[in-house]
């Protein structure tokens, strides 16, 4: 979401005559677009600006943008004297004006009538692009700061989404990833179904691959599950955050589903699409999480066998209802649980990736591999796995038939079938 916003902010500022530079030393304004979902992200943003405060003596301005700006507003200017401009996510249309005025200690945050920046991003040369379809969230999971920083759910109109995608297609984009805190709630405020949007985008000729994230298990409609089967352009990959395998924890987290319901969804999608990749998010050490709660989570992880997991140590966020609870799991214990899950998942991920060895798949070519010598490419398999494959003639933004020969934690390895054909012809000629 932040990556997408940053591209949009760049496009907005370029429209107002600003241009990006390669280092903070060359800039008039240094801005950090912040995330505040966990304390660590916030700390890193502040540390970055703090380490560049010497630039202010040279007349430069330091700006804090994004969710941390929303969360603390004016207080940031008092707490960190080296910050000059604070501008929240959702107020970016005011940013050019703030920069033009060249005033220090100014801030703008809060709800906006223009939550989406309606300017096409610059051509990045990439064949894949993000497109935000919703802003905000009203689910109030008890640990989560997003409803406080991004405000109420707002769905982008279908016309705006299609226009944005058409412009990206003109720039050579062939893969679209639709973003929302819970895309399953797209249209709750406007009456339009998310699958309607998906179907329409899949009908665009220029688009070869499509994906969306994130889905909330509390609202997982059957028609969305069916789309993995019915829409060939859609990656067979569902990211469905579980957070915990203990019903007691899920209740305290205000997640509004049970482990049983979660497992029911997994079974349904796997029955419809046996090859589907399933990934998830887990939080360790939520207030009052006992050893028993933790092992319940481990047990679900072992049962589901996720393709991959994003595991986070619980981080208390200001204003959330969990921040009123006693954060009683010591950091060392949060870390131990975090590491235990990562270790268990590592073996499962390798096993899940190796199930493709020996199989052939249609891989979306993203780019040439920089690490490997000439003739290696990076792509995504039809179940959204990262692929490193050998081929001399591949082009980013196309689909390539690839045979998988091995796999590890992060990649499927293989070679292009075309390459195989070429090599065999070459051998025949030599014989
Ligand atoms: N909207 C998405 C997730 C947004 S944040 C959803 O509902 O799934 C991404 C992930 O960060 C969450 O799924 C959760 O696992 C983690 N997270 C959010 N707040 C957190 C907190 N306070 N401490 C630790 N992890 C957190
Ligand atoms: Fe946060 Fe829950 Fe909304 Fe996701 S659904 S953004 S975790 S409040």
Image: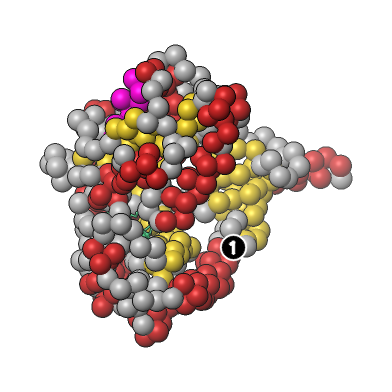
Residue at 41% across, 20% down: 102
The quarter of the picture where residue 58 lies is top right
Q: Is residue 172 found left or right of 421 in the rendered image?
A: left
Q: 43 or 310: nearer the eye?
A: 43
Please state the horizontal and vertical placement of residue 362, each as a whole percent of the image: 52, 47
Please state the horizontal and vertical placement of residue 14, each as a whole percent of the image: 44, 19
- The quadrant in which the N terminus is found is top left
Please state the horizontal and vertical placement of residue 136, each as a whole percent of the image: 25, 45
Please state the horizontal and vertical placement of residue 383, each as a whole percent of the image: 46, 54
Q: 93 or 63: nearer the eye?
A: 63
The answer to if 95 sits in the magenta stretch is: yes
Return the residue found at the far top: 17
The answer to if 263 sits in the magenta stretch is: no
Q: Is residue 347 found left or right of 429 in the rendered image?
A: left
Is ligand 1 less than 8 Å from the beta carbon at label 1?
A: no
In what element is the residue under mark 1? loop
Q: 165 or 83: nearer the eye?
A: 83
Residue at 35% across, 63% down: 316
Can residue 13 be seen by looking at this rendering? Answer: yes
Magenta segment, which residues?
90-98
The overriding secondary structure of the stretch rendered in magenta is helix
- The 10 Å Cα crowd at callout 1, few under 14, some 14 to 19, many 20 or more, is some
Q: How many marks?
A: 1
Looking at the picture, does residue 235 appear above or below residue 196?
below
Q: 241 or 304: nearer the eye?
A: 241
The quarter of the picture where residue 244 lies is bottom left
Looking at the picture, does residue 334 appear above or below residue 82?
below
Label 1 sits on residue: 409
Residue at 47% across, 45% down: 46
Q: Colour scheme used in the picture?
A: secondary structure
Can residue 208 be seen by looking at this rendering? Answer: no
- The quadrant in which the C terminus is found is top right
């Amino acid at each position: 979401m932040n990556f997408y916003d940053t591209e949009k902010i760049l496009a907005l500022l370029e429209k107002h005559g600003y241009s990006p530079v390669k280092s903070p030393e060359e800039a008039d304004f240094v801005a950090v677009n912040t995330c505040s979902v966990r304390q660590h992200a916030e700390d890193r943003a502040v540390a970055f600006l703090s380490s560049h405060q010497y630039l202010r003596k040279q007349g430069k301005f330091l700006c804090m943008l994004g969710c941390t700006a929303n969360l603390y507003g004016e207080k940031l200017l008092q707490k960190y004297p080296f910050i000059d401009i604070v501008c929240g996510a959702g107020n970016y249309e005011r940013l050019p004006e703030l920069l033009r005025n060249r005033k220090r200690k100014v801030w703008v945050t809060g709800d906006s009538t223009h939550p989406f920046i309606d300017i096409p991003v610059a051509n990045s040369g990439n064949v894949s692009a993000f497109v935000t379809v919703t802003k905000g969230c009203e689910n109030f999971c008890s640990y989560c700061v997003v409803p406080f920083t991004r405000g109420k759910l707002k769905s982008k109109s279908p016309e705006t989404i299609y226009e944005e995608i058409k412009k990206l297609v003109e720039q050579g984009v062939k893969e679209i990833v639709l973003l929302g805190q819970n895309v399953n709630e797209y249209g709750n405020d406007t009456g339009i179904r998310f699958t309607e949007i998906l179907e329409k985008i899949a009908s665009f000729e220029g688009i070869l691959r499509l994906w969306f994230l994130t889905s909330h298990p509390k609202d997982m409609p059957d028609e969305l599950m069916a789309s993995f089967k019915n829409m060939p352009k859609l990656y067979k990959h569902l990211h469905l955050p579980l957070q915990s395998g203990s019903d007691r924890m899920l209740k305290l987290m205000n997640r509004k589903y049970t482990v049983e319901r979660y497992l029911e969804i997994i079974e349904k999608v796997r029955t419809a699409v046996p090859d589907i990749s399933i990934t998830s998010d887990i939080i360790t050490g939520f207030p009052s999480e006992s050893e028993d709660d933790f092992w319940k989570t481990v047990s679900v992880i072992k049962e589901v066998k996720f393709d991959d997991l994003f595991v986070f140590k619980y981080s208390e966020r200001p204003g959330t209802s969990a921040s009123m609870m006693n954060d009683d799991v010591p950091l060392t214990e949060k870390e131990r649980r975090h590491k235990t899950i990562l270790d268990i998942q590592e073996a499962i991920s390798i096993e899940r990736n190796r199930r493709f060895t020996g199989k052939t798949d249609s891989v979306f070519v993203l780019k040439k591999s920089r690490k490997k010598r000439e003739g290696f490419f990076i792509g995504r398999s039809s179940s959204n796995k990262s692929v490193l494959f050998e081929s001399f003639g591949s082009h980013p933004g196309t689909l390539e038939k690839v045979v998988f020969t091995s796999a590890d934690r992060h990649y499927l390895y293989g070679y292009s079938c075309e390459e195989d054909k070429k090599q065999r012809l070459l051998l025949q000629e030599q014989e």
